[in-house]
Amino acid sequence: MKYRDKEWLQEQFNEYKTVTNVANKTGYPRTCITRYAKKYGIYESLYTRNKCNDINENYFKVIDTSEKAYFLGLIMADGNMYLKNNKLQFSIKLKSTDSDIIYKLSKAVGFDESKLKFHKGTRNGTETIGIELKTYNQVFCENLLNKGIVPNKTGKESFPAIRDNLKKDFIRGFIDGDGWIGKDRNRIGVASMSLDI
């Protein structure tokens, strides 16, 4: 079996990044890929299988980059945290015209793009298409929970304790989620039910 060859397996991880991707692309069982990847020290422990998807569960543990601060602001505006049967579930859905943002977030957190979901709906009589990233990874959800992304957060949004130099990036993300820029480019607005925001 090819997955027993360390060099071959390393090449697959270099190209496909995650256990799930390697298994899907090569046709070998995920359990076998995982076993030998761990044996050879190839498997990245930050990618864990938790309720049907791989994700960098500690991405939001520490907000120490502009990218993380931006995505946290976007999630504070447009993300959702649910609690079902004592399990957390995170979801963020944007309209398809903003799909590039979801793809960038997916790449940043190591989420398999093939598991992004497209949804059709209608709004004011017009058909809309949305794209959604959803995860049940409890560590990922808890890290967001600790940053203020709580269930039923509308009106409870809060400005996170992050470094001063990253606050502008958080605000930029929040504006992309719940704000607008005037057509004349001289006005910026933000809508929120939270006075803290």
Image (spheres, rainbow, N blue to C red):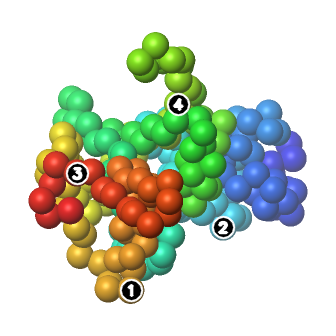
Front residue (pair 137, 192): 192
Q: Nearer the viewer, mark 3 or mark 1?
A: 3
Could you say whether the residue bearing mark 4 is in a helix, strand or loop?
A: strand
Is residue 59 visible in the rendered structure shown here?
no
The quadrant where residue 5 appears: bottom right
Mark 2 or mark 4, earlier in chain: 2
- The numbered mark at residue 145 is none
* Structural crowding at the residue carrying mark 4, measured as other residues with C-alpha within 10 Å and reported as few (<14), some (14–19) or many (≥20): some
Task: Say whether marks 1 and 4 touch (CB < 8 Å).
Answer: no
Could you say whether the residue bearing mark 3 is in a helix, strand or loop?
A: loop
- Label 1, on which residue? 165
Q: Quadrant of the C terminus?
A: bottom left
Mark 1 or mark 4, earlier in chain: 4
User: Where does residue 58 sit, x and y in percent of width and height?
Assistant: 42, 64
What residue type is disc 2 on? Answer: Gly
Residue at image position (81%, 56%) is 15
Could you say whether the residue bearing mark 1 is in a helix, strand or loop?
A: helix
